[in-house]
Amino acid sequence: MSNFVPGIELSRAFYGEVVAPLVSGVSHSAALIGPGSEVLEFDTARSTDHDWGPRVLLFVAAERVAEVEAKVAAGLPERFGGFPTVFPYHERVRPGVTVADLGEWLVGRLGFDPREGVSLLDWLSAPWQRLAEVTGGEVFFDGLGERGLEAARAALRWYPQDVWRYVLACQWQRICQEEPFVGRCGEVGDELGSAVLGARLAREVMRLALLLRRRYPPYGKWLGSALARLPGSAELGESLGAAVAARSWRERQEGLSAAYGRVAALQNRVALAERLDEGVRGFFDRPFQVIGAGRFVEALMASVSDPVVRGLPVTGCVDQLSDSVDLLVAPGRARAVTAAALGLTA
């Protein structure tokens, strides 16, 4: 395991040494994007036990997909970098080179082609994990011109300002809805319930911190790893770790309060809305400390200038509406649920 080569390095070499010569003269784009821990560079030696090998996505004109696919399959060596070039991937044995039409692939992953423009419904129905997968990874070659892969990635690099404000407001709203309950559960002797709520709130704070730093939060397996990579996130991580590990609601509240203060300070630095006090405060006459997350919701929504965005219910994008995996991996379902919840049409 000490000789582990990250997947993105393996795939970069695979394209340069094997795949590129096979498609010489064919207009194409080549990349490692889409699913896989290696795309977001979270892979380790452990990742090699399944769905692993030298991989390249090769995008060509729709009418040439079958031809190029056959040519590449016929020319692949049996192994590259110590790994087979044909291997089980997502329950099907296939070559490590996927050949596709770019537009069709984008619609399949996102539900739309960003090269045609990105609507409000597009932005809010695209799961964070999918946005991270399309904008992350690496493009090895982009030979499809102005409508190539880099154009699609550039269109999705980050939310427009008002959509960003809206998503942030909805993330604060999720904190607002539960922040006093950690103490209330503990006060009546329900430490288990308090711990569950504390962990839920820790997740929302982690996502908020990433969103404030213009990072699409990845799905649960890599959320903590993504936060740890944020410059200056060590103290926030320590506060959240203390909250999750706490054995009493008062210790849990202390850790969460410190974390709330840090993301409040981060929002003030980002300067997307009115500057607000970063300190926690009491919750009515009860002995519970809260940040008063609703203040941040109101400030962010007040700073939105687009009347359509400002008129949306503060429920959020698809990741804030649901954490059902079966919903988030199906673009049609994600789009339908988001449209229904927000009253949007294509």
Image: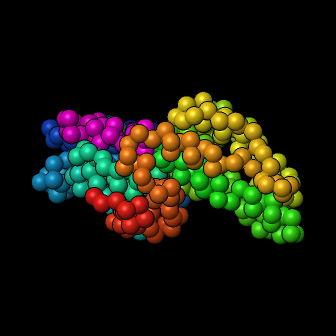
Picture mark count: 0
| Residue found 80% across the figure and 66% down from its top | 185
Residue 338 figure quarter:
bottom left
Question: Measured along the vertical axis of the image, is residue 303 above or below residue 58?
Answer: above
Q: Is residue 259 left or right of residue 271?
A: right
Closer-to-camera residue (293/225) = 293
Closer-to-camera residue (300/243) = 300
Q: Is residue 298 left or right of residue 238?
A: left
Closer-to-camera residue (49/335) = 335
Q: Is residue 183 left or right of residue 296?
A: right
> What segment carries the magenta color?
141-163
Image location (x, y in percent) of residue 173? 59, 53
| Residue 312 appears in the rendering | yes
Q: Is residue 216 left or right of residue 96?
A: right
Q: Quadrant of the C terminus?
A: bottom left
Residue 179 figure quarter:
bottom right
Question: Measured along the vertical axis of the image, is residue 197 above or below residue 75?
Answer: below
Image location (x, y in percent) of residue 309? 40, 48
| Residue found 48% across the figure and 47% down from its top | 166
Colouring convention used in this rendered image of the protein: rainbow
| Residue found 45% across the figure and 41% down from its top | 304
| Residue 41 appears in the rendering | no
Question: Measured along the vertical axis of the image, is residue 215 above or below residue 285?
Answer: above
Residue 142 lies in the magenta stretch: yes
Closer-to-camera residue (97/60) = 60
Image location (x, y in percent) of residue 142? 26, 36
Which residue is the extreme one toward the front? 285
| Residue found 16% across the figure and 48% down from its top | 61
Residue 25 lies in the magenta stretch: no
Image location (x, y in percent) of residue 247? 86, 59
